[in-house]
Amino acid sequence: MKYPFSVNTGATEDSDETTILEGFIFERSDDPTVLFLHGNQETDSQKDMHLFANILLTKKLSSVTFDFSGFGSSTGDFKNSTLDKRFEEAKDISPFLNPESQLLICATGTNVIPAIKLTEFYNIKTLILFAPNVENQKQDEEENKNYLSTIFEELNIAKHIENFTGNLLIIKGKNDRIADKPVTNLYVNAFSNTYKKELLVIPNAGHNIHKFLKDNTDAFKLMMSKVEKVL
């Protein structure tokens, strides 16, 4: 079953804007143990995750999807959406998750960064990162290499990555020129203390990984064969 919900996040110290986050709970009889964080492109929304959420229901896993402020059906201005704000909004969803269970978090694009920060607040068994990326990459190869060398410290996620001992599955498209090989390797190599770790490269897929998986049954089955090993 799929149930809609709304969360009023209220004003913050940094903003007087009151935001209503719209989401869905994909639930069987148990409280959700899966949280989905959609991508950071303006056209991205929780709908990108609904096929995956429905499949997880068949594995007896209940989940939560929602739109960040400025995305999809949630209120707010896309231009005001920042990684820090999305992190706080992800924490606002916590009442819908089972606090006594180990969680699975699936995140996309640069929103893998708030997902990584959530490891400090939740008992997370598995992180699944789709096309993980960082903002403001440089055009010059050498300049970008230097930029990436310190980016996790600047984002304040280096310690979270070091301390994470659960399962990690990274999924990206072979033809993805946004979340390209250098940044993918950055994430893969940084997680050095995971219980299980795997990189799945989907042939022929670009950066819009969820649309490709939705439209290509064989690729989706390949992904699920890897997901089932870390549930």
Image: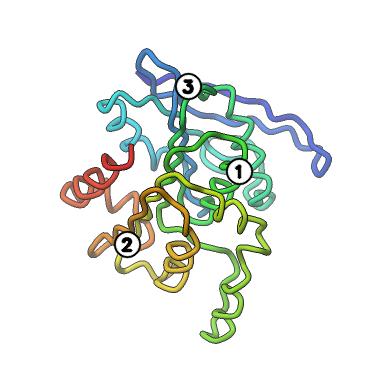
Q: Left of 204 or right of it: where is 178?
A: right
- Tell me the tag on residue 216: none
Query: Residue 30: x and y, percent?
Result: 40, 16
Mark 1 or 2, closer to the camera: 2
Three-letter code, disc 3:
Pro
Q: Is residue 146 placed above or below 43 in the rendered structure?
A: below
Among all residues in the image, which is located at the extreme top? 29
- Mark 2 sits on what residue? 173
| Dot 3 or dot 2, earlier in sequence | 3
Query: Residue 148: x and y, percent?
Result: 57, 73
Mark 3 residue crowding within 10 angstroms, few (<14) / some (14–19) / many (20+): few
Three-letter code, disc 1:
Gly
- Mark 1 sits on what residue? 70
Q: Is residue 17 placed above or below 161 in the rendered structure?
A: above
Mark 1 residue crowding within 10 angstroms, few (<14) / some (14–19) / many (20+): some
Three-letter code, disc 2:
Gly
Mark 3 or 2, closer to the camera: 2
Question: What residue is shown at x 28% (from left), y 53% (from top)?
Answer: 212
Between the residue at mark 1 and the residue at mark 3, the CA separation in whole angstroms equals 18 Å
Between the residue at mark 1 and the residue at mark 2, the CA separation in whole angstroms equals 26 Å
| Secondary element at image label 3 | strand
Question: What residue is shown at x 33% (from left), y 56% (from top)?
Answer: 198
Mark 2 residue crowding within 10 angstroms, few (<14) / some (14–19) / many (20+): many
Between the residue at mark 3 and the residue at mark 2, the CA separation in whole angstroms equals 31 Å
Using the image as rendered, state which of residue 205 and residue 159 is in the foreground.
159
| Secondary element at image label 1 | loop
- Tell me the tag on residue 4: 3
